[in-house]
Amino acid sequence: MNETKRVFKWWDSSQSEIITAWLENMEAQGWHLTRINWNGLRFHFEKGASRKMSYCVDYQPKADRNYASIFEDTGWDKIYSSAGWYIWRQSYQDTKPEIFTDIDSIIDRNKRLISVFTALIAAQIVILITNINNVLFYPFLFLYIPLIGLLGISLYRLVVENKKLLAKKEIL
C-alpha cells in the first residue's frame, strides 16, 4: 500500500517563493505532490523516490488560451489552477528550470497581485465603514479586522518585494 499524507499549509500570494521551495523540498524528501485542494491550502502527497522538481506559482486572472500551452510546450505540468492561480512543475536533472527568467516578469506578476489586494482591502474598508453603526455587524468585526490586517500584510510584502526587485534591476 502506498504511503500518503495530506498537509495543510497556509500561504499567501506574497509567499510564492516560500511555497515553491517547500514543495521542492518535499519532492527531494520523496513526497510527490499528487493534488492540491480547490482552496490551494491542502496538499496531498504520495511517498516515492527522491526527485528534483522545480515548482512555480503564477497569478494570471485573465489567462488567454495560449497561456497554458506556452508552459506545457516547454515541459511544465499544471498541477493546480483556481481563481487565476496556477502552480506549475517540471522535473529536471542538472539545471533547475525557471518560469520567471527575468526580473520584469516577477515584477509584473507582483503588480497584478498588488492591484488585487488593493481592491480587496478597499472593498473590506467600505463594508466596514458602511456597517460600523449597525449593532448586528459587531460580531463580524472579529473577522474583518484580522482580514484587513492579513490583506495589508500581504500587500506590504508585495510592495517591498517589488522595490527590492526594481533596485536589483537598476544594479544589473
Image (tube, rainbow, N blue to C red):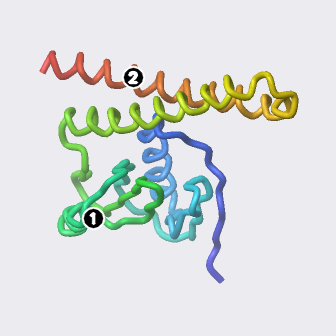
- Identity of the amino acid at label 1? Ala
Q: In which quarter of the image is the C terminus?
A: top left
Instruction: Name which residue lies at 68% across and 27% down.
Output: 130
Q: Dot 1, how many residues are within 10 Å of its Cα: few (below 14), some (14-19), or many (20+)?
A: some
Q: In terms of secondary structure, where does tag 2 sit?
A: helix
Q: Quadrant of residue 108?
A: top left
Closest to the observer, 20 or 66 = 66
Of the residues under marks 2 and 1, which one precedes in the sequence? Answer: 1
- In the rendered structure, find residue 147 and report the number of the disc placed on it: none
Q: Where is residue 133 in the image (x, y as percent from the top left)?
A: 79, 22
Residue 75 in view, yes or no: no
Q: Dot 2, how many residues are within 10 Å of its Cα: few (below 14), some (14-19), or many (20+)?
A: some
Closest to the observer, 136 or 157 = 136
Instruction: Name which residue lies at 34% across and 51% down.
Output: 60
The residue beneath circle 2 is 159
- In the rendered structure, find residue 68 and report the number of the disc placed on it: 1
Residue 80 in view, yes or no: yes
Q: Position of residue 57 (x, y in %)?
A: 39, 49
- Identity of the amino acid at label 2? Val
Real-space Cα distance between discs 2 and 1? 27 Å
Q: Position of residue 77 (x, y in %)?
A: 33, 67
Closest to the observer, 25 or 77 = 77
Residue lying furthest left in this view?
172
User: Is residue 100 positioned above or below 165 on the image?
Assistant: below
Q: Position of residue 164 (x, y in %)?
A: 31, 19
Q: Quadrant of the N terminus?
A: bottom right
Q: In which quarter of the image is residue 70?
A: bottom left
